[in-house]
Every structure is written in structure tokens, then in C-alpha cells.
Amino acid sequence: MTAGETIRGLLELTRPVNVIAASVLTFIGAFVAGGIAEQPFAVAAAVGATGLAVGAGNAINDYFDREIDRINQPDRAIPRGAVSPRGALAFSIVLFVLAVALAVTLPWLAIAIAGINLVALVAYTEFFKGLPGLGNALVAYLVGSTFLFGAAAVGEVGPAVVLFLLAALATLTREIVKDVEDLEGDREEGLNTLPIAIGERRALWIAAALLVVGVLASPLPYLLEYFGAVYLVLVVPADLVMLAAAVRSFDDPTAGQSWLKYGMFLAALAFVVGRASMEFGLF
């Protein structure tokens, strides 16, 4: 492999789209808490720490998952030889160290959340991924906690709690669908994921039910006056995309989990615009 291919492989390990998405969620958490203008350096540190930690977590996940990925995802960086397993591990450690360096500049609650999340990121693949539902729930917590982390960085967690719950439910749904998608490789490796433990259809029905709860709860930020009315206008398309994704997952889990990701991005946009409308008194 050339140096360019190795650099590309290292970048792929971080899952840049996931890194950007998690960083944006942290920024939204800080924005909802009203700390963007007042504490810009804390917000920047929190966003940077989130991006680095997510990249590190994805890299170490690929390190532990390298044998499964030879079956499920042979084009990923480690299976195709762009990055060695040892190189991926070293890369993840560097990213973790940089994330910690930024996190320790924040208030104690943000540091506590960061510490819990860093331990969870490292432990996920090795200890929790193969446990029915528990691994999914841990990932859901990690995604939702980005809102809490951003809010804690500026000292006000309360408004972000609802966002944490909504993001966690949507993510839990997507993680279950992803386990259905990866069923063959997980079974080959002896993992006991939720679809393996209770069957694909039952797992998908659980995922759909969780998503419905999240959709029904999506008006809460408006009802609690965190967001303006424009939020409702924007969150409806996001809800529809995610509901369609749940239905699609029964026939094509790969397409279903992809649609869920798009729906979550749309929901994040609704959060931003909805809060902005309140901030500037537009709607």
C-alpha cells in the first residue's frame, strides 16, 4: 500500500461522516443550552473532543472487529490491507489522548461524561457488542450523550436532556437494524446479538416500536418551549423518513439503516433551526 492509500485508510477508520455528525450534535447541545456566544472556547473544545473520541472509538472498533469485517465488510481499511491492525490501534490511542487533552479543560460534569464515554467506547466491541440489546443500548447512549456533553461544557444540561432521549431512541433503532444486516458475520463469530437471540423479525419489530416512541415524543422540545414552531415543520419530514426506514428494514436492512441515518440528520437540522427561531424570535 502507498502512503496515500494508508492515509486514506486511517481517515476511513474514523468514519468521517459519523465524526462530523457527533460533533454537530455536541454543538447543538451547547447551542440549546445557550452557551455558544458566552463560552466559545469551551464549545470548541467540546466539539473537538467529541470528534476525536468518536474517530478513536471507530478506529478501535475496527481493530477488534477485523475478523468479522473480513466477512461483513471486506472493503474496510484493515481487511483490505490499507492499515495494519497494530497501526489502527496506535492511531486510535493517539486520537484518544488528544480527546482527553481537550476534555480536561471543561467543567467537571463534562469531564465526567467524557470519562464515562471514553471507557464505553473502548469496552463496547470487546465486552458489550455481542450481548443482546446491551451493546445497542450502549451505542444509543453514546450518541445521545453528545447533546449532554455539549450542554455540560457550557454549564447547563437541562435543555439537552430531551434531545438526549430522542437521539438515543433513534440510534437504538438503527443499531438493531444494523445487527440484522450483519447477522451472517456475527453468527460466524459466535456473537449473540439481539436478532440472533430472538430472531430477525422480532428484533425488527422491537426496533420499529422504539422508533414510534421516539417519533411520538419528537414534539416535546416544542411543547417544553426549547424550540419554536418551525421545529415542528422540519421534524415531520425527518419523522416520516425514519418511519419509512423502519418499514424498509423488513425487506432490506441495509437500505433501512441508511435511511434512518438520513432521517436523524434531518432531525438534527430541525433542532438547529428550531432553536435558532427561538433565539432570534422568528417563530
Image (spheres, helix red, strand yellow):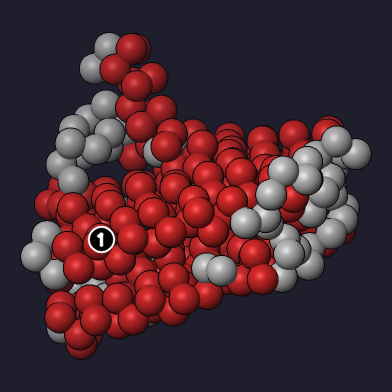
Q: Is residue 182 left or right of residue 221?
A: left
Whether residue 194 is visible to the viewer of this picture, yes or no, is: no
Above or below — where is 45 with respect to 4?
A: below
Q: Position of residue 161 (x, y in %)?
A: 69, 68
Count neighbours of disc 1 (C-alpha within 10 A) and say few if under 14, some if 14 to 19, many if 20 or more.
many
* Residue shown at 67% from the left, 55% from the top: 228
Vertical position of residue 244 compared to residue 8: above or below: below
Q: x%, y% of residue 249? A: 18, 65
Residue farthest toward the front in the current orientation of the protein: 283
Looking at the image, which residue sits at the far right? 38
Residue 26 in the image: state x and y as whole percent.
65, 47
Q: Which sits in the foreground, 44 or 54?
A: 44
Instruction: Report whether 93 appears left or right of 89.
Output: right
Q: Residue at x 43, y 34 (%)?
A: 16
| Location of residue 252 (image quadrant) | bottom left
User: Could you tell me which residue is drawn at 30 percent across and 66 percent down?
Assistant: 243
Count of residue discs: 1
Name which quarter of the figure residue 110 lies in. bottom right
> Which residue is depicted at the point 24% across and 17% down?
1
Q: Position of residue 127 (x, y in %)?
A: 43, 70
Answer with left or right where residue 12 lies relative to residue 162.
Answer: left
The residue that mark 1 highlights is: 245
Name above or below for residue 122 compared with residue 218. Answer: above
- In the displayed structure image, the side of residue 200 where residue 234 appears, left or right: right
Residue 266 shows in this picture = yes
State the SS at label 1. Answer: helix
Q: Which amino acid does the dot numbered 1 rest on?
A: Ala
Residue 120 in which image quadrant: bottom right
